[in-house]
Image (cartoon, rainbow, N blue to C red):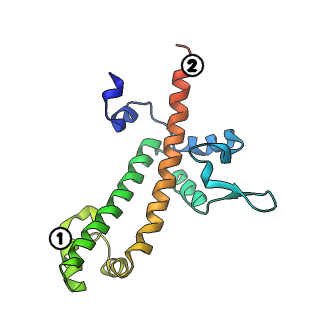
């Protein structure tokens, strides 16, 4: 039964949806602010002019740079970025609670997992991150959420096309 399959497996079985379709979808919607998924990223100022969350152009540019990218890839990138930020925060909180000095904490983090980003990045980035993890990861997480929303919305549009087109 399809409902019993894990969600990501069901999404992976959809035909690939190009990330270029995100931009096409925005153009087709006309009023993206009225969309229940991506609508909160758009608004109006006091004069009635359309406003756009500052992350929208950044994420759209990122999606467009990957000419062969798919929305499923973007979805996984977004989930991975959020996951890594969450694990980094949890690991740092636990290690700080043990009273490790900053340099020992950094060495321990670098040894824990390459996916956390500490081993791959330069030492200066890791030190900056440790000094203010909220600021360092908050923007990343917000960009990942916007990427997720756009990818899911474009994939849902493709799925809706499958469901409503007679075979």
Residue topped by disc 2: 165
Q: Quadrant of residue 130?
A: bottom left
Check the image and name the residue furthest to the front: 97
The quadrant holding residue 88 is bottom left
Q: Residues within 10 Å of mark 2 (few under 14, many from 20)?
A: few
For image coordinates 49% across by 52% down, the residue present is: 147
- Residue 156, image x and y in percent? 51, 35
Judge the density around disc 1: few (<14), some (14-19), many (≥20) Cα neighbours within 10 Å: few
The answer to whether 74 is drawn above or below residue 12 in the figure is: below
Q: Is residue 75 left or right of residue 29?
A: left
Determine whether label 1 and label 2 are within 8 Å by CB: no
Q: In front: 75, or 89?
A: 89
Determine the residue positioned at 82% across, 61% down. Answer: 47
User: Which residue is painted at 52% across and 52% down in the image?
Assistant: 63
Residue 21: x and y in percent read: 57, 40
Helix, strand or loop status at disc 1: helix
Residue pointed to by mark 1: 111
Frontmost residue, 70 versus 8: 8
Residue at image position (58%, 47%) is 38
Marks 1 and 2, how far apart at CA? 52 Å
> Quarter of the image holding residue 103?
bottom left
Q: Quadrant of the N terminus?
A: top left
Residue sitting farthest toward the top? 167
Task: Give x and y (percent) for residue 86.
Answer: 33, 62
């Amino acid at each position: 039964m399809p409902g019993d399959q894990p969600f990501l497996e069901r999404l992976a079985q959809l035909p690939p949806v190009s990330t270029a379709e995100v931009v096409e979808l925005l153009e087709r919607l006309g009023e993206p602010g009225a969309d229940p998924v991506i609508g909160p990223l758009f608004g109006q100022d006091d004069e009635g002019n359309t406003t756009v969350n500052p992350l929208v152009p950044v994420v759209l540019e990122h999606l467009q740079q990957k000419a062969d990218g798919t929305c499923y890839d973007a979805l996984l990138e977004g989930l991975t970025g959020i996951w890594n930020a969450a694990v980094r925060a949890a690991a740092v909180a636990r290690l700080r609670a043990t009273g490790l000095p900053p340099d020992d904490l950094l060495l321990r983090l670098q040894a824990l997992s390459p996916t956390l980003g500490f081993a791959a990045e330069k030492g200066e980035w890791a030190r900056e991150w440790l000094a203010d993890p909220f600021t360092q990861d908050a923007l990343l997480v917000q960009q990942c959420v916007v990427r997720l929303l756009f990818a899911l919305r474009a994939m849902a549009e493709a799925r809706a096309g499958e469901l409503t087109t007679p075979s």
